[in-house]
Amino acid sequence: RQVRSPNPSPSLAPRTRPLPSGLFWCASSAMVFFFECSDPQYTVYMGKDKFENEELLKYGWPEDIWFHVDKLSSAHVYLRLPPGTMDLSGIKDKGEAKQKLLDAMASVPPPILNEMAQLTKANSIDGCKLGECDVVYTPYLNLKKEERMDTGQVGFKDEQFRILMRNVEKDKEIVKVLEKTRREAKVDFRAEKEQRDDEEKMRKRKSIAEHKLSEKAEKAQHEEEKELKSYAALSHLEKTTNVGVSKTGSVEEAREIEEDFM
């Protein structure tokens, strides 16, 4: 399955608001629109046109979820989840990896999904004119770009992760609120991705180091408990083996015990 990008969106004057964390200003970078949804833990952005969409396809993050109007031209809209949400490191089982992606998608609240669908529909030349339309979304990791595809065109690796929101009707109030937060910025996608990857590597190294320390502490505690149990057992054995053997501890008594034994 393949989808195409829309015609360029109307240009907006740059605003002096800061970019979301991890994003870079760069005069040579492509333009991107940012929006603020009702939950600040998410970052919402979309390409200005098909050329910017191409850059987004190159340097997207694993935490990104991609939205598009189904079977129609529309903007490529992205919802960026919190860091680590799509972390597949250390997962070797394909079924477990798939479940991780499905769980990440399922973690997005319905109101946020609706806001994304409204924004996507509103930024479709044909979709915005319809009373209702379908909106598809999928993890960025599920997007497939091939050399034969046109600029901004994309396909899917696995249809299992292609979720369809059917019969999305326009909600003018939601669109109005989102559009008020729209801002345009030039972003260095490559630098942004490199910083993200570096931070992710540091986070993983820290996590591995903490895990090793925890394992070492648990092992030391286990050894200590094992040693204490061994000492307690030995002490108990010494007490029980001497019970009734000797009353006075004298040499004469020892000889009597030895003669009885013999």
Image: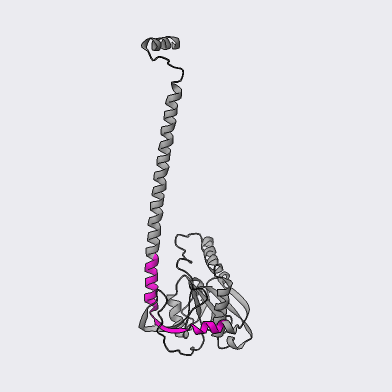
State how the image is colored.
Answer: one colour
Residue 187 lies in quadrant: bottom left
- The vertical placement of 140 against 9, above or below, is above
Is 35 a magenta residue? no
Which residue is at a point 39% across and 44% down the rendered structure image?
220
Is 175 a magenta residue? yes
The C terminus is located in which quarter?
top left
- The vertical placement of 86 against 4, above or below, is above
Residue 38 can be seen, yes or no: yes
In this rendering, the count of numbered labels is: 0
Residue 1 can be seen, yes or no: no
Q: Position of residue 213 (x, y in %)?
A: 38, 52
Which residue is at a point 40% across and 66% down the rendered structure image?
200
Q: Position of residue 57 (x, y in %)?
A: 46, 77
- The vertical placement of 243 against 44, above or below, is above
Residue sticking out furthest to the front:
248
The dominant secondary structure in magenta is helix
Which residue is at a point 41% across and 12% down the rendered structure image?
258
Which residue is at a point 58% across and 72% down the rendered structure image?
110
- The vertical placement of 220 against 107, above or below, is above
Foreground pick, 214 / 164: 214
The N terminus is located in which quarter?
bottom right
* Span shown in magenta: 174-200
Q: Position of residue 111 (x, y in %)?
A: 58, 74
